[in-house]
Image (cartoon, rainbow, N blue to C red):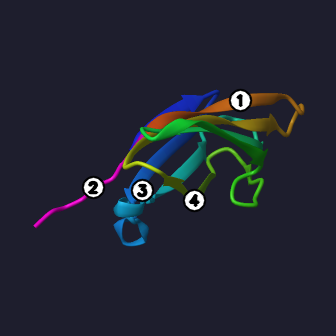
Amino acid sequence: MVVAVTDGIQVSVEVTYQAEFSSPLQHHYVFTYKVTIENKSQQTVQLLRRRWEISDAAENLKVIEGEGVVGQQPTLEPGESHTYVSGCNLKSGLGKMKGYYQMEKIFDGKKFEVVVPEFQMIATIFHN
């Protein structure tokens, strides 16, 4: 698990290689990642947008941007958290992701970026 804190917002990420959905011979590797966003600040915040940078050993950098996360723009009161699971397909068994969330403080409408720490995606392939 990797963790980063920005302005009182903690982001934790856990990655799992999905061997049963992957086809290494076809250069198709599937990973899921579970993200937990915890509001450790004193202000209510809302997640507005996300930006991901995805790279692997087989291709160049891919950038994904959009509103919210998995179709949601959660609002977090102080002490609350939001967890979601998403996935990523790579052409190699080794990659990494990082990015940020654009958040807004509800009280004054101030927008700020929260770092999503870089995390590794490594296919664990077992041979008999």
- The residue that mark 1 highlights is 113
- Residue 123 appears in the rendering: yes
Question: Is residue 43 rendered magenta in the image?
Answer: no
**Image x and y of residue 33, in percent:** 49, 54
Q: 126 left or right of 30?
A: left
Q: To which residue does mark 4 refer?
A: 86
Q: Which residue is mark 3?
A: 27
Q: CA distance from mark 3 to mark 4?
A: 20 Å
Give whichever of discs 3 and 2 has the lower sequence position: 3
Give the distance between the C-alpha atoms of the residues marked 2 and 4, in whole angstroms: 19 Å
**Label 3 vs label 2: CA separation?**
14 Å
Q: Quadrant of residue 104?
A: top right
Comparing labels 3 and 2, the label whose residue is closer to the camera: 3
Element carrying mark 1: strand
Q: Quadrant of the rendered structure where residue 60 is? A: top right
Give the residue at x 74% y 54%.
74
Q: Are marks 2 and 1 in contact (CB under 8 Å)?
A: no
In three-dimensional space, the C-alpha distance between marks 4 and 1, rounded to whole angstroms, equals: 20 Å
What residue would you read off at disc 2? Answer: 124
